[in-house]
Image (tube, grey):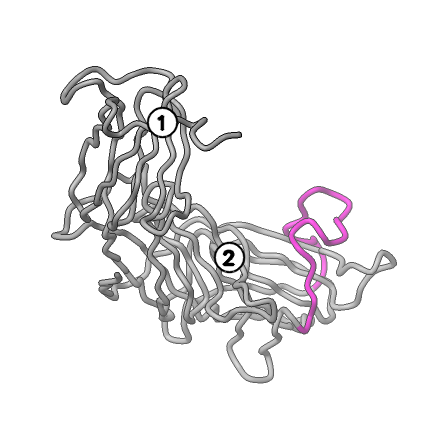
């Protein structure tokens, strides 16, 4: 069950990673990456040196990036790459210059270039023309930020080491699957994305406590989204009497009330996070199998004991020929 909320704040620049899709400042300058077929970061023709931020002769061009048309220039966290628009002999776009940081100055030979600016997972590409006169070019990213968190019922905090998020494209492909954009995002981490709707999966633990939601990122703003998990941590142990010591070398199976397997483990204790609902525990120790039904209530952590007595025991050889 989802109970999300959103707050929009001013977005602050930060570290960069790679681009999703490009947006530019005017209609004639908008060049979608899918049409350009820009290479991946590792898929371009390298210049003679490993990094060539500017050539010493040619036209002077200053490149700046903004989140929106009306926002301030981003002063850190950008990665600039300047490509020639025609593929080289290897079929790749030659990379002629690159730089990191904020607004950057390049000296390029007169001609046409494709400029790509990436800011986190947001990015945009623009075609520019360099001449003899200095010029200033703005690249509008049309991007914002997303910060994710999750709580239990009543606003109870979830340990951050047990909570992760994955961000997917909102629309499913022809095969019914959504493309994964960013996996394993820690809570309260700011992720920079192009404006749009994203499908977010929140996972508490590693079993079946999963919440899915569609979240919109707005350009120039930080969107904060908090979802509510209805789940709890449970610790299973096999004992000879209530409150007794857990028996070692126990094999555990947790099933839904319809008999579908949820989790298996081996050890004196079996700890896990389960979504609220009804379950059956099957514990095997030596040649005996013990069983118990139990219910998980969201936000209520509990120890569940299975008594190793005749009332809960079955013989795995019963019914065998």
For residue 146, what is the image quadrant? bottom left
State the residue in front, 31 or 224: 224
> Seen in the image, is 52 located left or right of residue 308?
right
Q: On screen, 293 above or below 43?
A: above
Identify the residue at image location x=49%, y=57%.
121
Residue 220's disc is none
> In the rendered structure, does residue 50 fall within the stretch colored magenta?
yes
Magenta stretch in the rendered image: 35-58
Counting every numbered tag in the picture gives 2
Residue 289's disc is 1
Identify the residue at image location x=18%, y=35%.
302
Q: On screen, 188 above or below 222?
A: above
Identify the residue at image location x=17%, y=17%.
244
Residue 181's disc is 2
Secondary structure at numbered mark 1: strand
Identify the residue at image location x=37%, y=75%.
70
């Amino acid at each position: 069950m989802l109970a999300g909320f959103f707050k929009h704040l001013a977005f602050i620049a930060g570290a960069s990673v790679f681009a999703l899709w490009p947006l530019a400042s005017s209609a004639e300058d908008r060049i979608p990456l899918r049409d350009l077929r820009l290479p991946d970061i590792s898929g371009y023709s390298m210049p003679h040196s490993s990094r060539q931020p500017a050539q010493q002769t040619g036209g002077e061009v200053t490149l700046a990036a903004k989140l929106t048309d009306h926002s301030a220039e981003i002063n850190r966290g950008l990665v600039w790459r300047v490509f020639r628009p025609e593929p080289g002999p290897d079929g790749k776009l030659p990379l002629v210059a690159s730089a990191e940081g904020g607004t950057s100055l390049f000296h390029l030979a007169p001609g046409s270039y494709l400029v790509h600016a990436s800011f986190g997972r947001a990015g945009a590409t623009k075609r520019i023309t360099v001449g003899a006169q200095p010029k200033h070019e703005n690249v509008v990213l049309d991007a914002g930020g997303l910060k994710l968190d999750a709580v239990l019922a009543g606003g109870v905090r979830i340990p951050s080491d047990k909570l992760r998020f994955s961000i997917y494209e909102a629309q499913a492909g022809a095969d019914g699957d959504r493309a994964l954009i960013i996996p394993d995002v820690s809570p309260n981490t700011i992720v920079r994305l192009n404006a749009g709707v994203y499908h977010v999966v929140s996972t508490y633990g590693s079993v079946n406590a999963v919440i899915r939601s569609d979240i919109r990122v707005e350009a120039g703003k930080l969107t904060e989204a908090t979802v509510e998990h209805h789940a709890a941590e449970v610790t299973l142990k096999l004992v000879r009497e209530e409150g007794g010591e857990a028996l070692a070398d126990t094999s555990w199976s947790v099933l839904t009330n319809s008999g579908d397997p949820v989790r298996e483990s081996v050890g004196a204790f079996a700890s896990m996070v389960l979504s609220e609902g009804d379950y059956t525990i099957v514990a095997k120790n030596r040649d005996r199998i013990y069983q118990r039904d139990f219910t998980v209530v969201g936000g209520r952590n509990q120890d569940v004991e299975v008594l190793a007595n005749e009332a809960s025991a079955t013989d795995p050889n019963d019914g065998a020929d």
